[in-house]
Image: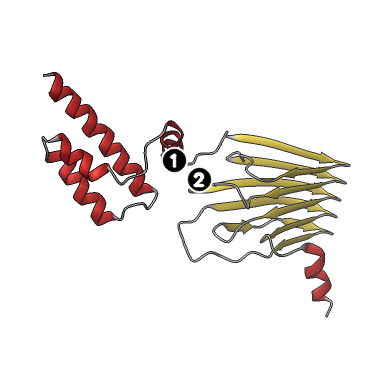
Amino acid sequence: MRESESLERYRKEVLALLEVNFAHDVINVDEYERRVDIALNTSIEADLVRISGDLTPLTDATAQKFQEEQQPVRHSRKDDLIIGILSRIERRKTWNPAKYNKILTLLGKVELDFTEVKLPPGTTVIEFFCVMGHLDIIVPENVRVDLTGLPVMGNIDNRTSDPENRDCPVIKVRGLTLMGSIEARPPWKRRGWWRHRRRW
């Protein structure tokens, strides 16, 4: 009985090891399926040793990283409010946007950089009210920007391109700007450089 329990415990460890190595492209899908089939059907411990001996060990850090990668991406919270009054506010690197983001700028600038953000599937909403200020939204190629609004003596400019993947995350931007500017752009398009080029 003890030998049977030991074998089953070892079998589970080997299956977990196979899954992690497959997820990290150490083994391909055919090799993964072949070894899993052996692991599930064998009653000999030597078979389990044979199919797992060349794989990367499943350390605690590797297991934790694998579990984190398997977790579905979600918004960190439902609502967020960002206010820039006579100031500059930046969100960069791996910050966590909410599902609904309200932006208010008054003689200030808010920059939202989504370049390193893992957005969940579906829509992330940005609602803005910009008075003599600027909202700069920077997005990578794999994110679609749906930008509309009402500019009153101001400017609203979407300089992004639609990704080929129709199931990509979407940032929906809506609002009003009064003597201000709203701009959505890829990381490599700098605002000043592009406007200088347009004059020519």
Residue drawn at (75%, 51%) of the image: 176
Q: Position of residue 34 (x, y in %)?
A: 19, 51
Q: Is residue 180 above or below residue 83?
A: below
**Would you name the residue on which mark 1 appears?**
72
Residue 81: quadrant of the picture = top right
The one of 139 and 68 positioned closer to us in this rendering: 68
Q: In the rendered structure, which amino acid carries the disc numbered 1?
A: Pro
Q: Quadrant of the image for the N terminus?
A: top left
Count neighbours of disc 1 (C-alpha within 10 A) and say few if under 14, some if 14 to 19, many if 20 or more.
Answer: few
Mark 2 or mark 1, earlier in chain = 1
Q: Is residue 137 above or below residue 38?
A: below
Q: Position of residue 187 (x, y in %)?
A: 68, 59
Circles 2 and 1: CB atoms closer than 8 Å: yes
Q: Quadrant of the image for the C terminus?
A: bottom right
Residue drawn at (81%, 41%) of the image: 84
Q: Is residue 198 above or below residue 70?
A: below
Residue 63: quadrant of the picture = top left
**Would you name the residue on which mark 2 appears?**
120
Could you tell me how far apart the alpha carbons at marks 2 and 1 are, in whole angstroms?
A: 8 Å
Does 133 sit left or right of 10 as displayed?
right
The one of 187 and 47 positioned closer to us in this rendering: 47
Q: Position of residue 158 (x, y in %)?
A: 68, 62
Label 2 sits on a secondary structure element that is loop
Does 85 sit left or right of 174 as displayed?
right
The one of 51 and 191 positioned closer to us in this rendering: 51
Q: In the rendered structure, which amino acid carries the disc numbered 2?
A: Pro
Count neighbours of disc 2 (C-alpha within 10 A) and say few if under 14, some if 14 to 19, many if 20 or more.
Answer: some
Label 1 sits on a secondary structure element that is loop
Residue drawn at (75%, 44%) of the image: 90
